Amino acid sequence: MTYIWVGMLVLSVICGALTGRMEGVSAAAMGECIKAVELSITLLGSLCLWGGVMNIAEKSGLTEKISGWFYPLVGRLFSGVRRDSPAFAAISMNLMANLLGLGNAATPLGLTAMRELDRQNGERESASDDMITFVVLNTASLQLIPTTAATLRLKAGSQNPMEIITCVWLCSVLALAAGLLVNRALRGATRPRGTKSAARRIAKGGSRP
């Protein structure tokens, strides 16, 4: 990503110099910086609101209840993660944030979940099946309330920012289904022998050999 952004900046400057529009490039750069700050402030309100709700849920013990709600379905996807583990709690809260359309709020929860999954994986160089499944689940996330997208549409002047909700449901369901199907089809394809049995022992509370 660093190379891509640097390349875009350099290309813009070169094109501006060759076409004699350097003033336009400078004005666009300064103007978009201001718009970026305004956009950040616009998103900050909704992120603070739902981030506060997530924090209250964690402090009040609602996190554990949410984990219990998710376990019958999500537990089948993560065979090496126990219900009472910190990893599953972080996964559940990440899913809840994504359901509310809070991509930025879901990021720190996703990082926490990956750290816990990596710890269970013995911090190996290769990712475990559960880690790969979580990446798929987080990337192709199911959204019930597209909060961030609706906020951006409202900022852009939309009269009905939530009118996209049906399309969001359809796209997120199809993306999630496709991702999980491919993940299941390729599950364990690149895993060294013996990892599956070790993961099962960890799930049952045992230790690695």
Image (cartoon, grey):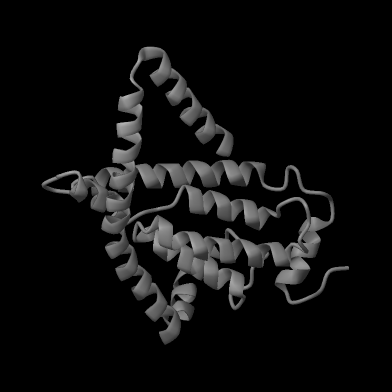
Judged left or right of residue 77, residue 40 is left
Identify the image quadrant of residue 174.
Answer: top left
- Farthest-out residue, top: 19
| Vertical comparison of 63 with 143: above or below | below
Q: Nearer the viewer, residue 144 or 180?
A: 144
* Residue 127 place in picture, x, y as percent: 71, 52
Quadrant of the drawing holding the C terminus? bottom right
Quadrant of the drawing holding the N terminus? top right
Q: Nearer the viewer, residue 120 or 27?
A: 27
Identify the image quadrant of residue 119.
Answer: bottom right
Judged left or right of residue 184, residue 72 is left
- Farthest-out residue, left: 159
Identify the image quadrant of residue 26.
Answer: top left
Q: Residue at x 46, y 68 (%)?
A: 93
Q: Residue at x 77, y 48 (%)?
A: 191
Q: Residue at x 20, y 49 (%)?
A: 155
| Vertical comparison of 157 with 59: above or below | above
* Residue 7 place in picture, x, y as percent: 53, 28
* Residue 40 place in picture, x, y as percent: 32, 54
Tally the numbered discs: 0
Please say whether residue 1 is visible from this viewpoint: no
Please say whether residue 76 is visible from this viewpoint: yes
* Residue 30 place in picture, x, y as percent: 33, 39
| Vertical comparison of 76 with 171: above or below | below
- Farthest-out residue, right: 209
Q: Which residue is drawn at 44% across and 79% down?
A: 58
Judged left or right of residue 83, residue 208 is right
